[in-house]
Amino acid sequence: MHNRLMQHQKFSRWHEKQLYLSFAWLLSCLMCGFLFAAIVEFVGKNLSGIFTIISLVVLYGIGLAAIELFRRFWMQFSFAQQCASAATCSHCGKYGQFEVRSETWPIYARCQNCDHQWVIGQDDDQGNPA
């Protein structure tokens, strides 16, 4: 029973979880930005030699990490928003009244109002998942 509850979440809870995860990536990206600014300030203190080179290498790594964290934020956020825009049942017109049956793309959904099943992430609505 517990496993079934873990596999089937209501859409609103699932969507909220996806948004929290995406904003966790954004927060991590912002923390990298603050660290980047702090190191730039440190490098500007007239350091010379090996410390400057090491600082620049660390800055490069932090910059790459910030870019990757922002990319992950945007992918997670756009995925959640794309699912939210396709969350209306085509049979009864209810929005978000279904269980999420999968954590992967595409998402298999079953309406709690009319028991209609569809796949979010496909262009055509075939009624039942494959």
Image (cartoon, rainbow, N blue to C red):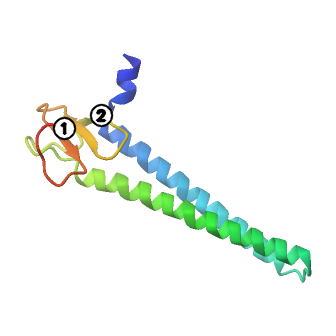
Looking at the rendered structure, which numbered label has been put on residue 112? none
Residue 77 in the image, given as x and y percentages of width and height:
41, 56
Q: Mark 2 and mark 1 in contact? Answer it, CB < 8 Å.
A: yes
Q: Is residue 127 above or below residue 6?
A: below
The residue positioned 14% from the left and 32% from the top of the image is 113
Mark 2 neighbour class, 10 Å CA radius: few under 14, some 14 to 19, many 20 or more: some
Q: How many marks?
A: 2
Mark 1 neighbour class, 10 Å CA radius: few under 14, some 14 to 19, many 20 or more: some
Residue 95 in the image, given as x and y percentages of width and height:
20, 45
* Residue 69 position by quadrant: bottom right
Residue 7 in the image, given as x and y percentages of width and height:
36, 29
In-front residue for pair 54/89 = 54
Which residue appears farthest toward the front when viewing the image?
130
Which kind of residue does numbered mark 1 sit on? Answer: Pro
Q: Helix, strand or loop at disc 1?
A: loop
* Residue 4 position by quadrant: top left
Which kind of residue does numbered mark 2 sit on? Answer: Arg
The residue positioned 19% from the left and 31% from the top of the image is 112
**Would residue 62 be found to the left or right of residue 17 on screen?**
right
In this view of the protein, can residue 42 be seen by the observer? no
The quarter in which the N terminus is drawn is top left
In-front residue for pair 104/31 = 104
Looking at the rendered structure, which numbered label has been put on residue 101? 2
Q: Helix, strand or loop at disc 2?
A: loop
The residue positioned 90% from the left and 83% from the top of the image is 46
Q: Is residue 48 above or below residue 113?
A: below
The residue positioned 10% from the left and 46% from the top of the image is 90
Disc 1 target residue: 129
Pick whichever of labels 2 and 1 is earlier in the sequence: 2
Residue 60 in the image, given as x and y percentages of width and height:
70, 72
